[in-house]
Image (cartoon, grey):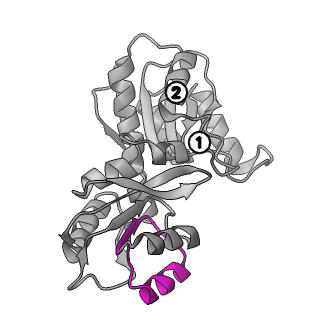
């Protein structure tokens, strides 16, 4: 399914190389280190340039089909094709690539560079969606702050309810490491997606964070957080990483006058 932000129509194509250069510059793609399988930037080219853009969280078959149905010739995703490393072009891998080739759709992937962007990024966008104000950095990865933190004063139960309303709109549910009842959030931190891990928990403890907002995390993070009196709000990996690609699509719409459609394909996780 797609959520279109503009009425589908064709515009004169913009050269793919021009758009890729603009994206790489805005996202600081070459400057931000990522996991080896991320392969940030253009992953698949096309032949005809770009007259319509689609965005999605994942480069799945369904997302690619939806992008084709929306008439897009560029699909921008947060999770690209190559997380598994070198692999034979067969099965699902072949089917995804074949869909891109058959419909002449270019694919651009941006993982941590999008998470870290100060205005278009997942963390910046989710901070605004939850009514919080960021004032510092969080979740250091190879010298770059992927997440954000801030000092608000809000009833934690109310913050969880905000997160629940937000997550439900993207097919996810919220869990917490501790009951939010009777707690106040005064120093929060955020790292979207798989943001709860041993490194972010240690960082949160050292900074005196009382509430950590993430997409998901391993079971042990909840156990550890309970013993440190840290309330982790697990708001869904998919849900917490929808806003960045949408904002990036909107940025391209403004920069190049290209119609944009967001592909909604929730996983429930």
Q: Is residue 267 visible?
A: no
- Mark 2 lies on a secondary structure that is helix
Q: Quadrant of residue 39?
A: top right
**Callout 1: SS:** loop
Q: Would you place residue 196 above or below residue 245 in this image? A: below
Q: Which is more toward the observer, 5 or 231?
A: 231
Against 102, is 83 above or below?
below
Cα–Cα gap, marks 1 and 2:
11 Å
Q: Residues within 10 Å of mark 1 (few under 14, many from 20)?
A: some
Left/right of residue 103 with respect to residue 10 in the rendered view: right
Q: Residue at x 45, y 89 (%)?
A: 227
Region rendered in magenta: 210-232
Q: Nearer the viewer, residue 255 or 167?
A: 255
- Contact flag, marks 1 and 2 (Cβ < 8 Å): no
Q: How many marks?
A: 2
Picture layout, residue 76 above or below residue 37 = above
Please state which of residues 173 and 201 is positioned toward the viewer in this rendering: 201
Q: Is residue 221 magenta?
A: yes
- The part of the image, by quadrant, that contains residue 172 is bottom left
Q: Which mark is residue 25?
A: 2
Q: Earlier in the sequence, mark 1 or mark 2?
A: 2
Residue at coordinates 43% horizontally, 69% vertically from top-left?
A: 207
Residue 237 is left or right of residue 39, and the answer is: left
Instruction: Tell me where residue 4 appears, x and y as whole percent.
Output: 31, 36
Within 10 angstroms of label 2, few (less than 14), some, or many (20 or more) residues?
A: few
Residue 180 x/y as whole percent = 27, 81
Mark 1 lies on residue: 32
**Res 247 seen here:** yes
Q: Is residue 43 magenta?
A: no
Residue at horizontal 22 percent and vertical 85 percent from the top: 181
Residue situated in front as seen by the camera: 230 or 83 = 230
Residue 259 coordinates in the image, percent (x, y): 35, 25
């Amino acid at each position: 399914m797609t959520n279109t932000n503009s009425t589908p129509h064709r515009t004169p194509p913009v050269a793919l190389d021009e758009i890729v250069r603009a994206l790489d510059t805005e996202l600081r793609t070459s400057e931000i280190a990522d996991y080896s399988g991320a392969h940030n930037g253009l992953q698949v080219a096309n032949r005809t340039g770009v007259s319509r853009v689609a965005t999605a969280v994942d480069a799945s078959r369904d997302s690619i089909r939806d992008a084709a149905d929306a008439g897009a010739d560029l699909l921008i995703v947060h999770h690209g094709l190559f997380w598994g490393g070198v692999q034979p072009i067969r099965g699902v891998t072949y089917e995804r690539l074949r869909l891109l080739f058959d419909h002449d759709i270019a694919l651009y992937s941006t993982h941590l560079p999008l998470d870290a962007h100060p205005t278009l990024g997942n963390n910046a966008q989710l901070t605004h969606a939850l009514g919080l104000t960021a004032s510092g950095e969080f979740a250091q990865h190879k010298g770059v702050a992927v997440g954000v933190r801030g000092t608000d004063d809000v009833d934690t139960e109310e913050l969880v309810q905000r997160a629940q309303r937000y997550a439900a709109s993207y097919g996810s549910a919220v869990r917490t490491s501790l009951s939010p009842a009777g707690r106040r959030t005064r120093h929060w931190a955020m790292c979207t997606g798989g943001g709860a891990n041993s490194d972010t928990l240690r960082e949160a403890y050292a900074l005196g964070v009382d509430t950590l907002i993430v997409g998901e995390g391993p079971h042990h993070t909840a156990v550890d957080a309970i013993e440190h009196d840290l309330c982790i709000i697990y708001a869904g990996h998919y849900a917490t990483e929808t806003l960045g690609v949408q904002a990036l699509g909107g940025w391209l719409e403004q920069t190049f006058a290209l119609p944009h459609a967001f592909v909604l394909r929730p996983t429930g996780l």
